[in-house]
């Protein structure tokens, strides 16, 4: 009989060297936690479902496989965000980050007073809650969240008889570790699978092999926690989750809301004693096809301990007393990644994935200082510049189409875009509609420039501002954003009309639409763009200046550059405005060269910078100056 990942039961036992941690499991007995289950979360960073229990024969993961052999894997689990901080923000809040304005990497947003991070509810129910040890949230904590959050946090520190909720997070498989040298590979680089979008080079194979090496080390750490649980006699009383925080740390997985960046391993074990809390489809050594995402974890936790998830949570409980029916779709998003702005939304029904690129004029592989430390990234870009890549490999370094559609069944590497396929029009329309409906339902704040999220939320919170239709007229803003990013020709007139709108976000997207259509559109709307250089909104000024700076006359480009240099000063403007402005200066390429000395004199840090985004302006300045001859 085949079980999880296509292995036989005998193969699973052989693979699961870590199954010794479960060896003592037998008939249920009453444990010290009484009727309340202990809950253990074991999490790892930057790894997709490259595990033995998911059918990956190249992986060496006996301990995680042992959990799956006793429990169940989710074949279609999504992290919601393809990068750590927004993904963790989704989990801790139970709300989509674009709904709270916390979608941008290493931002910081206040939650409304009526919202609580999920440990609050667990603590109210008598749970001892620990986090070992990473937090990395884009939303500010209010009040007590964890009993302990540190490298010493452990269920062993609780009072006798207290039920516990404990997280152990391992960074061993993180992006930074797959490029760490020196390293002697254990997995054979010649045997790795190279995705169709990556060039097949020694550098790429080595990075993939080291990634698998690190997953093995991470799995050993998982085994250590399982042995501690067994030593304490708690395995019969503890529900165990294992999951990765997003796709692999390799480029075009991490940071990208493709399935390659969003699909995560998620394994659930529920001991016999608590089988009444298990999902309806739960069976040992099985696989669930239910769509689950990080948005569902907070409500699921509350459901497992008998608490009705509050209505403001946006996910669906998939276990426990308040289990819901499976949702029809899962959703993903991309906002600012470190120092580079972008806006992408994605939807899947489990087979197809739809990508909506709201900034298609930006290339996929924007230069991100941290990402370019990986040898694969550098070699990939080098080969692109040399013209040595095929079509699937080139795409990462080129601008994006407004829409993408992939069939994960026939095209798991997501390289064959079906958005223009007549045969797939119906599924494209269905998923596109789902994306728009969710944006309206959660009041997606990604349609605002980052600076305006904070400005409009003054005196309140971004979430509350977003749900105020007077402060945030989302429907008309989305209408302009859809028009701007559609790349449809002959709409310059409608975009020009947007410059006269009372709402600055409409004007922002009008300018963005002109920028996307380049030289001819800029010439047609020169008057509106020049006037927009004095707009009340700094973000509108930036995008209008970028359009003129890249595609206007030399005289207009000079005017635009003056505006951008003023806004790039982080001592006079917010970090968000300065980042947006420096991105625009960088996009001007050699047209910014006359101001090289003035760019070098710009401050890279200021007291007004938000701590979590403090180094991004500095990274932009260094890259811009390095590129100017």
Image (tube, helix red, strand yellow):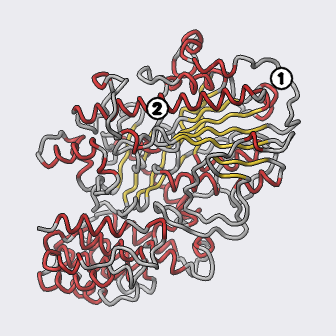
* Quarter of the image where the N terminus is located: top right
What residue is disc 2 on? Answer: 215
Residue 218 screen position, x and y as percent? 51, 33
What residue is disc 1 on? Answer: 28
* Quarter of the image where the C terminus is located: bottom left
| Mark sitting on residue 153 | none
User: Residue 447 lies in what quarter of the image?
Assistant: bottom left
Q: Nearer the viewer, residue 31 or 588?
A: 31
Q: Nearer the viewer, residue 513 or 253?
A: 253
Mark 1: give few (<14), some (14-19) or many (20+) Cα within 10 Å.
Answer: few
Residue 222 screen position, x and y as percent? 58, 31
* Residue contact between numbered discs 2 and 1, judged by CB atoms under 8 Å: no
Name the N-terminal-most of marks 2 and 1.
1
Q: Is residue 281 visible?
A: no
| Secondary structure at numbered mark 1 | loop
Q: Nearer the viewer, residue 318 or 383?
A: 383
- For the residues labelled 2 and 1, the Cα–Cα distance comes to 32 Å
Residue visible at 41% across and 73% down? Answer: 576
Mark 2: give few (<14), some (14-19) or many (20+) Cα within 10 Å.
Answer: many
Q: Is residue 67 visible?
A: yes
- Eyeballing the image, is 496 above or below 159? below
Q: Nearer the viewer, residue 221 or 189?
A: 221
Residue 354 screen position, x and y as percent? 42, 48
Residue visible at 75% across and 33% down? Answer: 238
Residue visible at 16% across and 43% down? Answer: 383
- Eyeballing the image, is 394 above or below 595? above
User: Residue 187 lies in what quarter of the image?
Assistant: top left
Left or right: 214 with respect to 497? Answer: right
Residue 75 screen position, x and y as percent? 54, 32
- Eyeballing the image, is 32 above or below 382? above
């Amino acid at each position: 009989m085949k079980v999880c990942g296509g292995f036989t039961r005998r193969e699973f036992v052989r693979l699961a060297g870590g199954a010794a941690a479960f060896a003592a499991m037998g008939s249920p007995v009453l444990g010290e936690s009484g009727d309340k289950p202990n809950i253990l979360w074991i999490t790892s960073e930057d790894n997709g479902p490259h595990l033995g229990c998911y059918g990956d024969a190249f992986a060496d993961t006996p301990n995680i496989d042992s959990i799956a052999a006793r429990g169940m894997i989710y074949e279609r689990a999504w992290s919601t965000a393809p990068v750590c901080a927004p993904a963790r923000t989704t989990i801790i809040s139970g709300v989509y980050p674009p709904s709270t304005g916390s979608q941008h990497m290493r931002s910081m947003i206040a939650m409304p007073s009526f919202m609580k991070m999920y440990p609050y509810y667990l603590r109210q129910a008598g749970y001892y809650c620990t986090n070992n040890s990473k937090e990395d949230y884009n939303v500010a904590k209010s009040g007590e969240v964890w009993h302990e959050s540190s490298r010493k946090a452990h269920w062993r520190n609780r009072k006798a008889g207290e039920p516990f909720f404990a997280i152990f997070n391992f960074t061993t498989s993180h992006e930074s570790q797959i490029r760490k040298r020196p390293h002697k590979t254990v997995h054979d680089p010649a045997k790795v699978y190279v995705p169709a979008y990556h060039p097949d080079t020694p550098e790429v194979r080595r990075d993939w092999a080291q990634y698998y090496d690190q997953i093995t080390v991470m799995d050993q750490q998982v085994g250590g926690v399982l042995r501690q649980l067994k030593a304490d006699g708690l395995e019969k009383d503890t529900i165990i989750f294992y999951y990765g925080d997003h796709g692999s740390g390799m480029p075009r997985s991490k940071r990208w809301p493709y399935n390659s960046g969003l699909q995560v391993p998620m394994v659930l074990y529920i001991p016999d004693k608590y089988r009444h809390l298990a999902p309806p489809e739960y069976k040992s050594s099985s696989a669930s096809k239910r769509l689950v995402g990080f948005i569902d974890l907070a409500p699921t936790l509350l459901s497992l301990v008998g608490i009705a998830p509050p209505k403001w949570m946006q996910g669906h409980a998939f276990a426990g007393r308040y289990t819901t029916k499976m949702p029809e779709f899962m959703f993903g998003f991309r906002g600012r990644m470190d120092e580079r702005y972008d806006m992408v939304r994605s939807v899947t029904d489990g087979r197809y994935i739809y990508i909506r690129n709201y900034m298609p004029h930006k290339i996929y592989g924007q230069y991100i200082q941290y990402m370019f430390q990986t040898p694969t990234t550098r070699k990939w870009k080098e080969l692109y510049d040399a013209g040595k890549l095929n079509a699937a490999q080139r795409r990462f370094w080129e601008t994006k189409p407004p829409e993408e559609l992939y069939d994960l069944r026939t095209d798991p590497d997501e390289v064959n875009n079906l958005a223009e396929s007549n045969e797939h029009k119906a599924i494209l329309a269905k998923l596109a509609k789902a994306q728009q409906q969710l944006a309206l339902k959660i009041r997606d704040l990604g349609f605002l420039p980052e600076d305006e999220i904070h400005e409009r939320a003054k005196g309140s919170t971004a979430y509350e501002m977003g749900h105020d239709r007077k402060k945030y007229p989302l429907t008309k803003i989305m209408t302009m954003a859809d028009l701007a990013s559609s790349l449809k020709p002959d709409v310059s007139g409608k975009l020009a009309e947007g410059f006269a709108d009372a709402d600055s976000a409409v004007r922002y997207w009008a300018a963005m639409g002109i920028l996307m259509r380049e030289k001819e559109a800029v010439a047609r709307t020169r008057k509106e763009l020049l006037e927009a250089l004095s707009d009340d909104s700094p973000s509108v000024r930036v995008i209008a200046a970028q359009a003129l700076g890249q595609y206007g006359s030399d005289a207009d480009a000079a005017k635009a550059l003056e505006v951008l240099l003023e806004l790039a000063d982080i001592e006079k403007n917010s970090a968000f405005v300065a980042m947006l402005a420096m991105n625009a200066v960088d996009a001007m390429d050699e047209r910014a060269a006359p101001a090289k000395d003035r760019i070098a004199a710009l401050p890279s840090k200021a007291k007004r910078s938000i701590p979590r985004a403090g180094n991004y302006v500095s990274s932009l300045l260094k890259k811009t100056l390095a590129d100017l001859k």
